[in-house]
Amino acid sequence: MRTTRTDSRDAKDSLPSGQAIGRSAQIFNEHNLDLYRDQVDQAADAVTAAVRRAKQVHSGVRPSELAPAFEALDLDDACGDMPAALEELRRLYLDHAVYFHHPRYAAHLNCPVLVPSIAAEVVLSAINSSLDTWDQSAGGTFIEQKLIAWTAKRAGLGDAADGVFTSGGTQSNLMAMLLMRDAWCAREYGHGTVQKQGLPTEASRLRVFVSEVSHFSLSKAAALLGLGHDAVVSVPCDAAKRMDTEALAVAIAACRAEGNIPIAVAATCGTTDFGSVDDMTAIGVICRAEKLWMHVDAAYGCGLLVSNRHRHKLAGIENADSLTVDYHKAFFQPVSCSAFIVNNGADLGLITHHADYLNPAEAAAAGTPDQVNKSLQTTKRFDALKLWLTLRTIGPDAIGDAFDGAVALARATYELMLAEPRLELLHRPELSTIVFRYRPCLTTSEAELDALNATIRAQLARDGEAMVAGTKVDGRRYLKFTLLNPATTVEQMREIVDLVVTYGMANDRNAQLVAAVPAANRAYRRHG
Ligand SMILES: *Cc1c(COP(=O)(O)O)cnc(C)c1O
């Protein structure tokens, strides 16, 4: 007689052994190691085949074209085995993925990843350590701590520096805004008051100064933390898109005159659009004189920490009270891999919370190392292992050379774009982005240019020919190359530039007319 689990009379007899459950549920353990090897191999084979097939950066598929395949799929009805599930995944995802390693991917701050970091993903997801407490991670905690100390040292921070790995720059910037707020509150009202009683009445008057091209996550953090978007004061930039430090001093004085309370300045080391690096020396002087917290958002510019050629651009970063670094942008690590670091480790005590079941105060007092006391996250991925295995395999210079390669590629691309009269270049690349637009002729209206450049970007993406980013500057539409692939050649960049011009001309109703105008009359440049 066939028994089922719902048949209570036979429940005892029909209960499968633990080992059988482990097998059928495919639990990772010592009995399933062959299965583990086999499935990881199959997954790697699927990736290998997909990357071999990916001649284009993207299939160009539209959401409306892909959606029906997902609607038809019933998650209660499993494929049954890994080969079938991977075959389905090919149709649904791999065939249409956006490939960041592709030489014609030049859109956002996504990097091709280093092979040792992928190998680390295999290790960290199998062992599955959680980097909150020592009793869930053991040596993993030391790995994370050693990488934080290494990064802090590269940035020239002091011996008391400390920090944690985070999910990304957004979380790191949130932590920065939180510490700026709570450090001020602790000074005014005593340690722990804001944690216990909430925000003081002056909270709506606290102000943090950022450049006008800083990352939106700072403003979002201010809103999340009850300070409001108005707490973030946007300071104008100079022609090179760096925060104008004279304007900063004026803004701080004006803020005080209005009865508001400056608490911090957030400098950007590598702005998302322009790669510009704020003057961290001058900002450091201002912060010291005005007793303000200095944050440095180096989500992008952190690649300079290992650069062999451009390290000097980091001058003044050692003044930072806190630092955001995104290894998943400029260190060629898979998402997520980021950190938040403070110069004075004691500042992280502002967010420490002891739970009896997790990180009792006695454990901290006994010197048990852990990361949860400094973190917004509790259960946390062992992302640090990716950077660790990369550094231990190929070393920091190899990462720095890759970053320098991307910077050199941007320079060379900029030079070749200068020779193309139909392109307007907005700045000299400081790191590895280039903001520009197709502008065939001075008389084309701004509205027409907006439409033309939006069309160029959309058509390139639709045809899967190239992915370039779009942004707005002074309300007008521009295109942007973000170059983080040191394996891309200048020749390949020339092909993308040619594509932009070709798509521009194909959509430009004045193209024929323009072709007749002497090149000298068409050339138009505006540089920072
Ligand atoms: C990308 C970026 C961020 C946000 O980082 P995520 O990892 O995407 O959360 C913050 N600041 C700057 C300057 C960035 O470029």
Image (cartoon, helix red, strand yellow):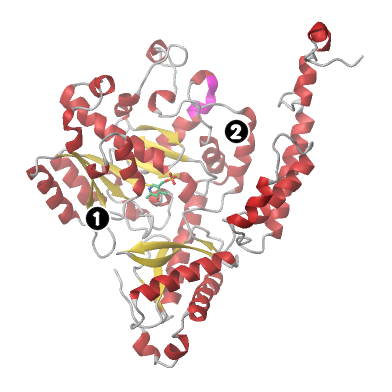
Q: Is residue 99 visible?
A: no
- Of residues 432 and 94, the one nearer the viewer is 94
Residue 70 pos. (x, y %) = 66, 47
- Give amino acid for label 2: Leu
**Residue 428 location, x and y as percent?**
35, 68
Identify residue for label 2.
124
Q: With respect to residue 353, does 206 lie above or below?
A: below
Q: Label 2's element? A: helix
**The N terminus is located in which quarter?**
top right
Instruction: Report if residue 138 lies within the magenta region.
Output: yes
Q: Which residue is mark 1?
A: 243
Q: Residue at x 76, y 29 (%)?
A: 33
Q: Name the one closer to the observer, 459 or 336.
A: 459
Q: Main secondary structure of the magenta part?
A: helix
Distance from disc 1 to disc 2, alpha carbons, whole Å, reads 40 Å
The magenta region covers 136-142
Q: Going from the N terminus, do you reach mark 1 or mark 2 first?
A: 2
Q: Position of residue 509 (x, y in %)?
A: 46, 83
- Measuring 25% from the left and 41% from the top, which residue is drawn there? 294
Asked whether, in this view, residue 370 is left or right of residue 157, the answer is right
Q: Is residue 319 visible?
A: yes
